[in-house]
Image (tube, helix red, strand yellow):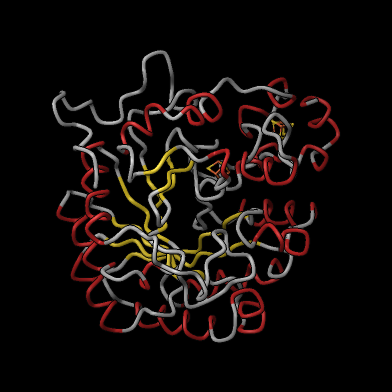
């Protein structure tokens, strides 16, 4: 059973008010702008770098039921969350996923973001998404060729995802091709950019992180410093390519702003819901120490407001070597998820800190 709606009995807070005494970069907002929700960890694929360790072997027995999931949507609406980003696993494997989307629409969520592997997007589903309206679909494609993509995502993944993107051409569904940049596919950046353009999608490049199965695959797939520098240079001339908020640790290399907020928004602008109702700072920080609570025993608003790991760890004062770095304003010290996974600490520079790649005078100024 779910607790009463978090807003019941008290006046509604102003939309995304900044907490007293804090700014968005500090203590966080009264509600996240985006909640990422892994509705299932079941998936018809088994990608080698899956951030959530999802796959066909995962049981859905403990997942939130559709009724429970509708209740979560109600809570997010009452908290005045701006948008929900549905993912998984493969969200279209979750029974009742379309009904969950319709419920979110009924509760006033105008933009429905969905991350999908694309392989289940047949004509019927695409028509249903089009009827729903306001759908922003991210289709994962980790290569521009079958050989490269399927080596990461499994046999048939490339062909079926591209077929879905072809099917989506000309339809009223905003879509991006979501490309995780790795050592294994860095050479296909230009080609995947062209492929996305051919199917009428925007390319979105994201950073590989050592979470889920990505942790075991990280050493093999981690881009080299030279590949990170090449990516940074490549992005400079391509403002049409989206990066979300994943490459702000490259900011010390200079050039144009790569978009997004430019700092880690975990527990400040965003958080993650798991299929079983656990709440974490973000999708890449799913370790027991960072578990903020569970929606079967506490309200979303209470967890967002009161979870010690949110307030003391992710909204705490920054500490460590990065704080005195002159590149800190743009870099923010990098990604806590990568730091924790690779070093077990948060008060250290991002393991992919690019200062050593900067021109000597810039690196000197930043040290
Ligand atoms: S030392 Fe820290 S703040 Fe400075 S560039 Fe490296 S990761 Fe960013
Ligand atoms: S911990 Fe890393 S992946 Fe998670 S929101 Fe922060 S920067 Fe992004």
What residue is rendered at 68% in x and 46% in y? 341
Q: How many marks?
A: 0
What residue is rendered at 55% in x and 73% in y? 194
Q: Position of residue 45 (x, y in %)?
A: 52, 76
Q: Nearer the viewer, residue 59 or 143?
A: 59
Q: Nearer the viewer, residue 112 or 216?
A: 216
Q: Residue furthest right?
A: 360
Relative vertical location of residue 16 with respect to residue 114 in this rendering, above or below: above
Q: Nearer the viewer, residue 365 or 282?
A: 282
Q: Position of residue 348 (x, y in %)?
A: 73, 32
Quadrant housing residue 143: bottom right
322 relative to 275 in the view: left or right: right
Q: Position of residue 261 (x, y in %)?
A: 49, 37
What residue is rendered at 63% in x and 62% in y? 213
Quadrant housing residue 105: bottom left
Q: Nearer the viewer, residue 262 or 365?
A: 262
Q: Position of residue 281 (x, y in %)?
A: 49, 40
What residue is rendered at 14% in x and 54% in y? 106
247 relative to 196 in the view: left or right: right
């Amino acid at each position: 059973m779910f607790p009463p709606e978090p807003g019941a009995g008290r006046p509604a807070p102003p939309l995304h008010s900044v907490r007293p005494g804090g700014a968005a970069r500090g203590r966080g907002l009264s509600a996240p702008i985006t909640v990422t929700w892994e509705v299932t960890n079941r998936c018809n694929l088994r990608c080698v770098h899956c951030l959530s360790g999802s796959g066909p072997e995962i049981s859905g027995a403990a997942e939130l039921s559709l009724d429970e999931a509708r209740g979560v949507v109600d809570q997010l609406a009452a908290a005045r969350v701006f948008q929900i980003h549905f993912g998984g696993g493969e969200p279209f494997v979750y029974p009742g996923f379309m009904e969950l989307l319709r419920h979110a629409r009924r509760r006033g969520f105008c933009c429905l973001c969905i991350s999908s592997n694309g392989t289940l997007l047949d004509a019927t589903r695409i028509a249903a998404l089009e009827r729903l309206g306001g759908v922003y679909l991210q289709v994962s494609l980790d290569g521009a060729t079958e050989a490269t993509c399927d080596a990461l995502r499994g046999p048939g993944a490339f062909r079926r995802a591209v077929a879905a993107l072809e099917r989506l051409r000309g339809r009223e569904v905003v879509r991006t091709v979501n490309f995780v940049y790795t050592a294994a596919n860095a050479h296909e950046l230009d080609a995947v950019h062209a492929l996305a353009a051919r199917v009428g999608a925007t390319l979105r490049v994201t950073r590989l992180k050592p979470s889920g199965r990505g942790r075991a695959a990280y050493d093999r797939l981690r881009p080299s410093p030279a590949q990170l520098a090449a990516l940074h240079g490549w992005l400079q001339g391509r403002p049409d390519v989206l990066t979300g908020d994943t490459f702000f640790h490259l900011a010390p290399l200079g050039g144009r702003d790569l978009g997004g907020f430019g700092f880690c928004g975990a527990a400040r602008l965003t958080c993650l819901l798991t299929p079983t109702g656990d709440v974490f700072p973000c999708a890449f920080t799913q370790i027991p120490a960072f578990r903020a609570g569970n929606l079967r025993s506490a309200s979303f608003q209470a967890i967002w407001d009161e979870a010690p790991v949110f307030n003391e760890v992710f909204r705490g004062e920054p500490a460590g070597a990065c704080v005195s770095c002159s590149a800190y304003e743009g870099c923010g010290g990098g990604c806590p998820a990568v730091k924790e996974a690779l070093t077990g600490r948060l008060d250290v520079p991002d393991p992919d800190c690019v200062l050593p790649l900067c021109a000597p005078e810039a690196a000197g100024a930043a040290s």
